[in-house]
Image (spheres, rainbow, N blue to C red):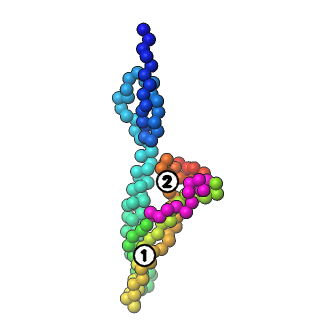
Amino acid sequence: MQEALKIKKVKYGNAERYSFAKIDELIEPPYLLEIQKKPYKEFLEKGIGEVLDEYSPIVDYSDKAELYFTGYNVNSAPKYTKDECRRARQNYTVPLKVNARLVLKETGEVIEQEVFMGDIPLMSEEGYFIVNGVERVV
């Protein structure tokens, strides 16, 4: 006798699909995007700060000034949306701004300022970058 076909909705990551399997999955499939997204998030949250700490302070050759990196910010909104980047062949990025303190030893003057250091490629929720308007996976 033929069994009735059982159709179940199953969820894999963010995707919802229909399953025609006779037995349930014994092991849930891994969320593979997490392998890319987690290290990138750690890089933005900790890695950049660790590199800045490693090179801070920078002392000039005459030992008259020191430059300290006291913090950084990559949390601002991207200049363009993902769709705008694709259409205009732009990069999907956010600005890296570093809080810098310049200490002039001769005068004792301290200058603090937020400095733009460049743009950091921003990973999309789907795990890819947009470079020159084209989606890229690293």
Residue under the image location 39 percent in, 56 percent down: 42
Query: Where residue 114 sits in the image (x, y, percent)?
Result: 45, 74
Give residue 65's quadrant in the image: bottom left
* Disc ID at residue 100: 1
Residue at (40, 35) in percent of width and height: 29
Which segment is the magenta one? 74-86
Query: Which corner quadrant holds the N terminus?
Result: top left
In depth, the one of 3 and 114 nearer the eye is: 3
Residue at image location 37% in from the left, 34% down from the top: 28
Query: Comparing marks 2 and 1, which lies closer to the viewer?
Result: 2
Q: Residue at x 61, y 58 (%)?
A: 90
**Residue 123 has which mark?**
2
Q: Amino acid at mark 2?
A: Met
Q: Is residue 53 left or right of residue 132?
A: left
Q: Secondary structure at mark 2?
A: loop
- Label the magenta part by its dominant secondary structure: loop
The percent coordinates of residue 130 (x first, y second) are 56, 53
At label 1, the amino acid type is: Ala
Circle nearer the N terminus (2, 1): 1
**10 Å crowding of disc 1: few (<14), some (14-19), many (20+):** some
